[in-house]
Amino acid sequence: MSAAILEAERTLPYAARDLCKLVGDVRAYPSFIPWLKSLRIIAEAPRGEGWEGVAEAVVGWRMITEKFSTRVVCAPEAGEVTVSLVRGPFRALDNRWTFQDVGEGAHVRFWISYEFRNPLLQQLLNQHKREAQARIMGAFEAEARRRLVPSDAP
């Protein structure tokens, strides 16, 4: 079985740097990301305006619970957050968010490629990937509305 890919793009009324910092604020994820039960930072170091480090997450959906660790690099000056697998139930996991100022807001692109070691889990998630994509992007959009000031605000 091959890797599944989820992609989404939006133009949102916020500054690219602010959106990048919001996505890079992984500590806040359990409060607004669907299926995320917990997240803790194992190691971190400052990097420019952002940070890099390792985060350990526990996700759950229905009767399934999995724990995995990822390397996170948040680089607001470059307009991107990247996430790669350290260990867990995946054969592969790569995630990239990019942010670019456009007009009165920012163009946001979300891309993730994942492949579970367990083919049944991969198949189950493949069947629900459109729903997952919509819920993930929707969660970040709602959090941006809650925490950020639109670019065109006085």
Image: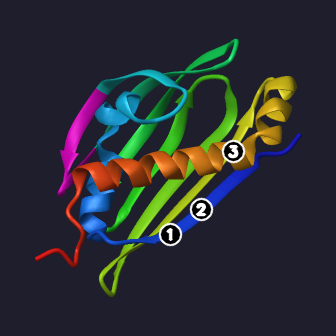
Of residue 24 and residue 31, the one placed in the foreground of this image is: 31
Are discs 2 and 1 less than 8 Å apart at CB?
yes
Image quadrant where residue 12 sits: bottom left
Mark 3 / mark 2, whichever is N-terminal: 2
| Residue 116, percent from left and from top | 74, 31
| Residue 30, percent from left and from top | 39, 28
Specify whether residue 116 is in view. yes
Q: CA distance from mark 2 to mark 1?
A: 7 Å
- Mark 3, residue position: 131
- Mark 1, residue position: 10
Of residue 13 and residue 59, the one placed in the foreground of this image is: 13
Image quadrant where residue 144 sits: bottom left
Q: Is residue 49 magenta?
A: yes
What element does badge 3 sit on?
Answer: helix
**Residue that lies at the very extreme toward the bottom in this rendered image:** 103
Dominant SS in magenta: strand
Residue 89 lies, with reference to residue 54, above or below; the image says above
For disc 3, the neighbor class at 10 Å (few under 14, some 14 to 19, many from 20) is few
Three-letter amino acid code at disc 1? Arg
Three-letter amino acid code at disc 3? Glu
Q: Is residue 57 magenta?
A: no
- Mark 2, residue position: 8
Of residue 148 and residue 76, the one placed in the foreground of this image is: 148
Please provide the residue range marked out in magenta.
Answer: 43-51
What element does badge 2 sit on?
Answer: strand
Q: Residue at x 67, y 23 (%)?
A: 89
- Asked if residue 34 lies left or right of residue 105, the reply is right
Q: CA distance from mark 3 to mark 2?
A: 12 Å
Q: Quadrant of the N terminus?
A: top right
